[in-house]
Image (cartoon, rainbow, N blue to C red):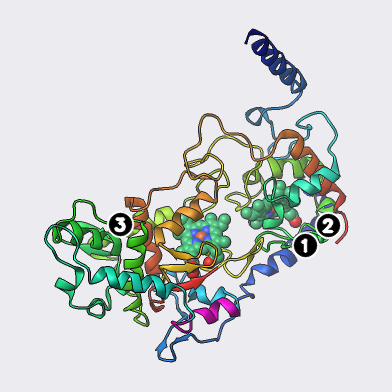
Amino acid sequence: MKRQIMLAAGLVLAATSLQADVIAPNDVVANEYGEIAASLTGQPGDPKRGAEIMASRGAGNCLACHQVSALDEYAWHGEVGPSLDGVGARWDEAGLRGLIVNADTMFPQSIMPSFYRVSGYIRPGDAFTGKAAQGELSPLLAAQDVEDVVAYLMTLTDY
Amino acid sequence: MTRNTLLGGVATAGLVVGMAGIGFADIRTGDSLVINGEIAMITEAPAPEFLQDRFSTIYSGWVFRTDETRAMQEDDFDNPAMLYVEQGLTAFETAMGTEGKSCASCHENAESLAGVRATYPKWDDAHGTVQTVEMQIIECQTERMGMAEPYGYDSQAMRNMASLIASVSRGQTVNVAIDGPAAETWALGEEVYYTKYGQLELSCADCHENNYGNLIRADHLSQGQINGFPTYRLKNANVNSVHGRFRGCIRDTRAETFAVGSPEFVALELYVASRGNGLTVEGPSVRN
């Protein structure tokens, strides 16, 4: 028993120290245009992982609304938002990070969800259970997920 | 600058091209639905006046479905929902409750209730509230038939009975009243319709007013009309209620839903029904 508790405490400590450089959702600072210059984690984004997050229904599920030619291997791209082809040429990194973190700062009232925000919601639920959220919300994507997605979007320079 | 300034022009052009999909181009209009070769449906109609500033035509959900799904609704022998209508009919003729009465004791036959589905939800003077078909059924069971435990709002027995009640109104034009004593409830429903719920911050309007005709991943978005309810869904192979569908759509926004039969959902049902004023009652329809 005792040992387990100590082990658990050790794990928590390890986790906190690992996350020391992560900017929590409520601490993110955007400029007046909604751009976020600083990386949320201080770690470079992994574009390959970013692509998987965008395609996965259980993660970003960006393809629900966006068409991306470079992700043609995945079936069913939505038509609700604009095509993301060439988005890396249209936007810079700080703008894309701002948009993914909180779409409403770029497009007020956007249908696009905010992926790294945990407050300001009406009747937030406990994931997809239909029940009320318990305790604090988790952001839709983790900090490193956002960095990976931004890194992938920056590769989409072709139209 | 948010966008690289030099490419600003391109950005705008890209957006326009991307948005071209939101031209409601993917709606297969012009086909007509006739059930059993005799009940002619109105699947496209001018939008009710209060919607005219938003769009001009309302469409039944049938318009958005594939040929196979559409065809299943054209003949009662192919429509799996008719089995539930049969069960509803048996229940209609069966005595229940301490009074020893069946629905047929007061309503002769189901056809005598033709027209009900087309005008509900409806203001009820005696109870001072807007009532759905389900609330009306519960009222008859508790106040006239002596049932201490009436059908659950979204129970199988209720969905069967609601399917029967809808089926006898098929082909009648939806015409729910939104003024007079119903106005307050209607306004609440409108508010719910336009509220962005949940962690995905999506309103009914985001999907069903601003994006009908568009794909959201593999789903072809309709206007979210309820003239076809109850609907037999291929997804769960059963008849589904209006409030069950509302609950599913709100749950998909990562929100805490309202309960079936709640004042919010009754109000939303009245509001959504009124957006379909001019279409015909199609329930029980077939959807995926």
Residue at disc 2, secondary structure: loop
Write down the residue under mark 3: B185
Residue at 33%, 53% (x, y): give it: B261
Q: What's the CA distance linking mark 3 and mark 2?
A: 47 Å
Mark 2 burial class by Cα count in 10 Å: few <14, some 14-19, many 20+: many
What amino acid type should be assigned to the residue bearing mark 2? Gly
- N-terminal of the two: label 3 or label 1? 1
Q: Are labels 3 and 1 assigned to the same chain?
A: yes
Residue at 63%, 43% (x, y): give it: A114
What amino acid type should be assigned to the residue bearing mark 3? Thr
Write down the residue under mark 2: A86
- Front position among marks 3 and 1: 3
Write down the residue under mark 1: B14
Residue B231, image x and y in percent?
45, 68
Residue A63, image x and y in percent?
71, 56
The part of the chain drawn in magenta is: B67-77
Q: Residue furthest bottom?
A: B37
* Chain bearing mark 1: B
Residue at 34%, 81% (x, y): give it: B172
Taking depth in this image into account, of B76 and B129 the one nearest to the observer is B76
Residue B75, image x and y in percent?
46, 84
